[in-house]
Image (spheres, helix red, strand yellow):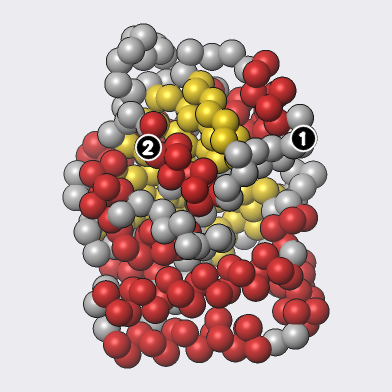
Amino acid sequence: MSLPRSGAVPAVSVVMAVYNAEPWLVEAVDSVLGQTFADFELVVVDDGSVDATPEILRKLHDPRLRVITQRQLGQTPALNHGLRVARGVLIARMDGDDVALPERFARQVAFLRAHPEVGLLGTACREISASGEVLRTITPPSDDRALRRVLIRTNPFTHSSMMFRRTVLDASGWYDERFVVAQDYDLWLRMSRLTRLASLDEPLVLRRLAPGQLSSARDTTRIHDEVAAKLKALRSGTYAPWCAVFLAKPLCALALPLALRRALRRAILRGSSPAAITPPSHP
């Protein structure tokens, strides 16, 4: 394993936007720096954190780590800030509370090099609790056709598992900063017009379900953004007009009282088994 030469353009730019990420930031960064594939840079954008995040980042020393600070603007502008300075021809996403397993980059880079027609690549993931307990394994469909069928219904991808080509990102228009939560879902829908999609069946990332991610207010924003992303996809012609039927589920969820929606979400998480959960492959 060799480090990239000083000043050399890395094969992969890993973009991580963080805000008050103190509890798990070291674990997240270490999981990136400990990858078996080492030709990358890690761009961490600190979005105005007021906890120990800035101090933690100052103490981390690795030639591949680049830290950028900005006033608090929100995750989506922070991600675009990171993308503006990223130099790699491949972009990998990572969140400050998740964990990349050691072979993640090696497997994804090898797949993308072998499949130049694929521009957006995810992996299966294990969802874990705040304490690290495995809750369930989520395995999206692996091939382009099945992923497209699922994508208009729901987002099959875990944001921290994604790797995509810079050329496809530039052509798609980057993250839409009007989206607070589902900025990734909107981007994948737009990318799907430009490139083929794929996902690796092996769980290569641990996605942490931190308490703030389960709040009713955040869930409501997520659903609103999901509806907006689907409407954009329909209006742009990415999907046929009849796919408007897939607006019914999120609109019905918005009609539920917040307390009931939150209780249903907790029940679903409690009832999930560690066995792989694969989204349906047919609309």
Residue 51, numbered circle: 1
Q: What x and y, as percent, mark residue 93? A: 47, 42
Q: Amino acid at mark 1?
A: Asp
Residue occupying the point 69% across, 37% down: 49
Residue occupying the point 55% across, 60% down: 180
Towards the viewer: 219 or 80: 80
Give the residue at the far left of this rendering: 117
Rendered position, 173 above or below 16? below
Kindly report the distance in space between the C-alpha atoms of the residues bearing marks 1 and 2. 25 Å
Q: What x and y, as percent, mark residue 218? A: 67, 65
Label 2 residue SS: helix
Residue 61, numbered circle: none
Q: What residue is shown with label 2?
A: 84
**Quarter location, residue 237:** bottom left
Rendered position, 106 above or below 129? above
Give the residue at the far front of this rendering: 71
Rendered position, 1 above or below 195? above
